[in-house]
Amino acid sequence: MSNPFFSSLAEFAKGRDSRKFTIEEVARYFMSRTEQLNPSLNVCLSLNENAINRARQLDARLARNGADSPFFGYPIMIKDNLEMEGFPTTCASKILEGYISRRTATSVARLLSLGAIVLGKTNLDEFAMGSSTENSAFGPSKNPWNPTRVPGGSSGGSAAAVAAGLAPLSLGSDTGGSIRQPAAFCGVLGIKPTYGRISRSGLVAFSSSLDQIGPFSGSASDALEALVAMGGRDSLDMTTTERDPGEMRRDFAATRMEETQIGIPEVLFGEGLDPSIRKRLLELREALGGKGAREVPVTLPHSAYGINVYYLVATSEASSNLSRFDGVRYGFRVKNPADLRTMYEETRDAGFGDEVKRRILLGTFALSAGYQEAFYRKARKVQSLIRKDFMEAFQHCDAILTPTSPTPPFAFGEKTGDPLSMYLSDVYTITANLAGLPALSVPVGLDGQGLPVGAHLIGPPWSEGRLLKLAEFISALYPMPLPEVHAGHPTVKGPGDRG
Ligand code: GLN
């Protein structure tokens, strides 16, 4: 997060406007840091060779007309499942090899139109399926705090990029926790907005009814500005809200810790939670009480089924969304297939990694005739009960506090042999997607081993502004040190590694 120029978006804008530095200087700094550290961290899958040129053009425009947005000249990175015209989009999959995007995701386009500079596209679990980036076909990213640990996933590259100071802000996507869990593992702030807040147009779909795009940043106010910039109605995504994204700024300004009721689902602080994380969270609860917040006990009885429901709904949608990768329309195709059918089969067999295949099989099974009623439809019913529990809880509280992840960042290979234990990484985060709710992870210091711990806040629909203000209060209690990142850590291989 730290860099020699600024510590926040607002400070960047001030320094830029007073000509303390040029946009080009800033872009060059982040680019060369990335070139130096990426060979060991493996957080970027591609770099924008035009970034410095764009910075120079923006400097010229700044000299002529000034800047009308804090994002004018601001360097960012985007997860490589977000499209940008003229650039490769791999989704960390072999099947998209050679594919060049012909459009730009609305979220990215809105930041670009304000003058942001995309420095590069970040690593992820293949098609955003995973919790460690180990499922990337191009090798896993490393956790900047400890190169033997995973950065989390699926947006591990975006989280690690901000933590390692390769960009001050990045974008990820979150279907079941893929922004919040890596944010917790890398010690940065990550927020998944309310479903419909940000257009999904140009995001390669995993589970369309759960996917949302959101930012990683060093501070709550930077995340707020990014959400406001990206949010709002988009004719290319009919699920986007008509609500004014500016409401988030107003809510942010109006939130006070003294008047806040924090919902505590006590069971979630019990079994299965790593003791060092529990300790940090209990300290946080006490500190919030000291600032005048009130604890309210809440029960979320159906959340216990969150993982089960998620792995039926998400895989069902994925099996349909991923049928478009057939060797005809995008990227990779096997050479000399015997006939059309073999071409489909062999392309998908060679192009997709094991986890993606596992999900397609699960989803196809859950939707098949005879099983649909027992699995898919039942899961949808339980999903609506999960949502109902939350809406009842929010009658009595403003936000619900849980840990973000049950464990600290784990070692490479620790969970790859056991998909179910990997799936449990998302026990705390998955229900917010199932209920369409905004939720964030904010760093609350380090555990005994020097690894970051995240606190997770879930709010009612459209409460991003308030959640971010609460995160700002929490950040003030836990000034985070910076990881020491070195070039030259050896690269690691993951199970998804087919590079
Ligand atoms: N880890 C979860 C999964 O593997 C969530 C992924 C995500 O949010 N994209 O599906």
Image (cartoon, rainbow, N blue to C red):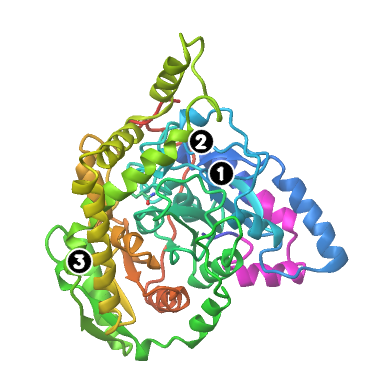
Per the rendering, the mark at residue 266 is: none
Residue at image coords 41%, 44%: 128
**Residue 22 belongs to the span the image colors magenta:** yes
Residue 135 placement (x, y as % from top left)? 37, 36
> Which amino acid does the dot numbered 2 rest on?
Pro
Quadrant location, the C terminus: top left
Q: Of 316 and 472, which appears nearest the observer?
A: 316
Do labels 3 and 2 touch, CB within 8 Å?
A: no
Secondary structure of residue under mark 3: helix
The residue beneath circle 3 is: 278
- Decide whether the magenta segment is chiefly helix, strand or loop: helix
Q: Residues within 10 Å of mark 1 (few under 14, many from 20)?
A: many
Residue 82 placement (x, y as % from top left)? 54, 47
Give the mark, 3 or 2, whose residue is nearer the N terminus: 2
Which label lies toward us, 3 or 2?
Answer: 3
Give the mark, 1 or 2, whose residue is nearer the N terminus: 2
Residue 86 placement (x, y as % from top left)? 68, 39
The residue beneath circle 1 is: 121
Residue at far right of view: 64
Which label lies toward us, 1 or 2?
Answer: 1
